[in-house]
Every structure is written in structure tokens, then in C-alpha cells.
Image (cartoon, helix red, strand yellow):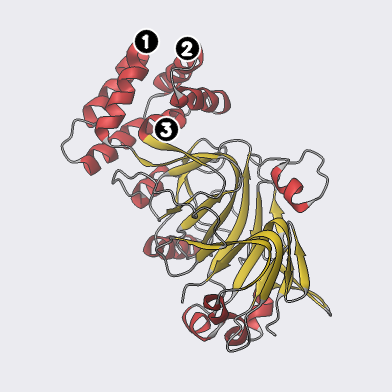
Amino acid sequence: MANFYKLRNQIKHYDWGSPDFIPRLMGFANNGEPCAELWMGSHAGSPSLVSLPSGEMSLGEFIARDPRRYLGEKTAERYGVLPFLLKLIAAEKPLSIQVHPNLTQARKGFERENKIALAHDAPHRNYRDSNHKPEIICALTPFTGMCGFRSPDEIRRLFALFLDSASAPVREGFAPLLQSLETPNPITALRNFLEILFNFSPAVKNALTEFILSVNGAKNCEWELMRNFARLYPGDPAVIAPLYLNVFRLEPGEAFFLKAGVLHAYIQGFGVELMANSDNVLRGGLTSKHIDIPELMKALDFNPLKPQINKPETNFSCFTYPAPCEEFSLTVMRGTGGVVSLPEAFAQSASIGIVTEGEVSVSGTVLKQGESAFFPAAGDTPPLILQGHFTLYIASVPQ
């Protein structure tokens, strides 16, 4: 029988986190402290701990004892470490508007900041590792966010509604923005648009916030979001992000894949997030953390893009979400009391699973709601047998 190992994971207490979602799932009382993320993996920022008879050991150290055995031959040969990071993400307030770098940008940026001896935990550091960060987000509750540029035509249409009753300073400040959207090439138009927006004068930024907060009643969902952003981050030009980014809402079980270079912000909700093993974030607003607009602009993909939402078929037992990357895939399994086997695809490489509903007996050992485990590559050993009423999310390396 293939072994698996229960994990003890660390919680990140960022100020945008919910005090309820993660404690409720994990089954512990909370004193109101925000619980933003639960990390499951071997990233040095917050490695999981493996429960062993001799005590606890970080997952990275555990894998390093025998990478080929625990990761599988192909994964060990290619990466040498676990190449993904699995999280629970619980947003009560908006996350920063941000982008993740591609692999080349991450390597160059990490090397550049190392050369100037910038501490890895420095607040103004952009690159905390040398890896890219494609990711997939899957909702456990209704989940709201923004992702990908709208087309210039759509932005102009929303601006017309927005400026309908705007003050003179706002109209004057927006004139260059509207002019930039007339550029025939949409990529050039969006690049020029964002450069102008980020360089608004303090007077225009303040007038923008005052105007948004002065309008009574909600014209549409974009207005509701902008009012919320303006209350939280007055004077930040990114408060109008709902006018130029696509606003999305995921229902539980729905997910989408986010490639590097796509501007986005998660706003509210609870979900499972899976990404390459990286913590690289370039921020452009809606945050009190370090913002580096020139670096963000270099990493951005300015092609208009709408998120493609995927969800399992009704009455599924096992579903793998589309994710066009080599480091990870996300699968959800649902048990209704019968006996099922862990798919053979998971036998060739390491996986991490977390139970989000019910409890599952895994070859005789029970994992309860909120518990997670590391499943080493099983090789030719028989697959693990699952039984119970449960929902289990599994991160693995595609083979």
C-alpha cells in the first residue's frame, strides 16, 4: 500500500483576510484575526510540516531525503522539488490589483535584486524567488474578482456612463484616457491608457475619489465595487479598475486558469488556489504594500482577455480542471459513500489533497474536513482506496 502523510500547514494573516472562512473549514475558534491564506507545499515562505512517528519535518526537507521516491522519476528529474503550491484563499476585503511575472522575468528580476543584496523579506522586494506564477482559482463559496483587460470599445462605453454626471476636474482628467483608447491597435491603446492612469495628478486622483463617493445609488455592479475601493483606498487611481478589467463571479465549484502577465484582483470569497511554486507578485494599486508601476508595466500582457470559467458536470465523481501548464493540475473528487480508487494518473508523481467537505477514509486512514495530506508517487503499488461522503481537492503534477 502506498503511504501518505498528514500535513500541518501555516496560515497567513494578511489584513484582507476573512476571520471566518478558514477557521470554519478547519474547525477551530478564532479571535477575529484575519486568516487570509493556508499554504500547502514546500515553498520556503511557509512550508507544510509532515507528521512522522519521530516528530514533524518540513515537507521540503522530507522530499529532499529521497526526491525520486517521493516526487516520482520525471518530476524529480525535471524540478528536484515539489513544483506547485496549493492554498486556501479567504478574502474579506479586496486583494491588490496585481500581475505575476513569466519565467524569464522572474529569473532576471530575482537575480537583479540578489545582486544588490536586497533582503528576501524586504517589503519593497518584487521577486521573492526565481519562478513564474501561473495559477488556477476554484470557488468554495461565491467568489468575486477582476481579471483581464476589457476591449477599448467596452471601456469607452463604460466610461460614457461613468462620466455622465462627473465633475469638471474628473472630465478634464479623463480626456487623455479617452483619447488613448482611440488608438487603432488595442494593445498599444491599453498600454497608453494604463500609463496615463497611473500618472494622474494628485488633484485628479482626489477629485476622482470624491466624485465616486458623492454619487448616491448604484448604477451597476462596477459602481458598487468602485465605491468600496474608494472608501478603502482614497486617492488611488486603481479604484476605477472595474471599468477596464472584466468583473467575474464564480459559483462554488467553478474555476478559471490565470496565466502569467494578466492583470487581476480577487475581491471577496473563499476558494482553492493552485499555482507554480512561487510567491512573486507585482502590485499596481488597491494596497498598502509595495507598488512598482514600471516593473508591473514590463510584466503585463495588454491583450484584451476574458476569463474562461470551467465547472464539473453534474453528478461528477472526479473532474480535472483545464490548466495549460506543466507544473500542476487541480482535480476535485466527490464521494457519496461508495468505494473509489485514486486515479492511476496520480501514482506517477507527488500530490497534495485537502478535504473541504465531509470526511474520507483513505485505505483505512481517515482525513476529516480541513485536513490535508501529501501523497508521494506510488509507482507500481496499488492505488489508494477512498470511501466516504466527501469533497477532496487534489493538486498534482501532470504526467
Q: Nearer the viewer, residue 361 or 18?
A: 361
Question: Percent position (x, y) of residue 105?
Answer: 39, 60
Residues at badges 2 and 3 in contact (C-beta under 8 Å)? no
Q: Residue at x 27, y 21 (%)?
A: 175
Name the outermost residue toward the bottom: 380
Question: Percent position (x, y) of residue 75?
Answer: 51, 80
Question: Percent position (x, y) of residue 59?
Answer: 68, 72
Question: Percent position (x, y) of residue 94?
Answer: 56, 37
- Horizontal arrangement in the rendering, residue 12 relative to residue 123 (left or right): right
Question: Alpha-carbon distance for marks 2 and 3?
Answer: 17 Å
Q: Earlier in the sequence, mark 3 or mark 1?
A: 1
Question: Alpha-carbon distance for marks 2 and 1?
Answer: 9 Å
Q: Quadrant of the N terminus?
A: bottom right
Residue of label 2: 215
Question: Alpha-carbon distance for marks 3 and 1?
Answer: 19 Å
Tag 1, which secondary structure? helix
Q: Earlier in the sequence, mark 2 or mark 1?
A: 1
Q: Tell me the crowding category of disc 2: few under 14, some 14 to 19, or many 20 or more residues within 10 angstroms, Cα based.
A: few
Note whether residue 235 is visible. Answer: no
Q: Residue at x 31, y 30 (%)?
A: 155
Q: Tell me the crowding category of disc 3: few under 14, some 14 to 19, or many 20 or more residues within 10 angstroms, Cα based.
A: many
- Which three-letter amino acid code belongs to the residue tagged 2? Val
Q: Which mark is residue 165?
A: 1
Q: Earlier in the sequence, mark 2 or mark 3?
A: 2
Q: Is residue 136 above or below residue 31?
A: below
Tag 3, which secondary structure? helix
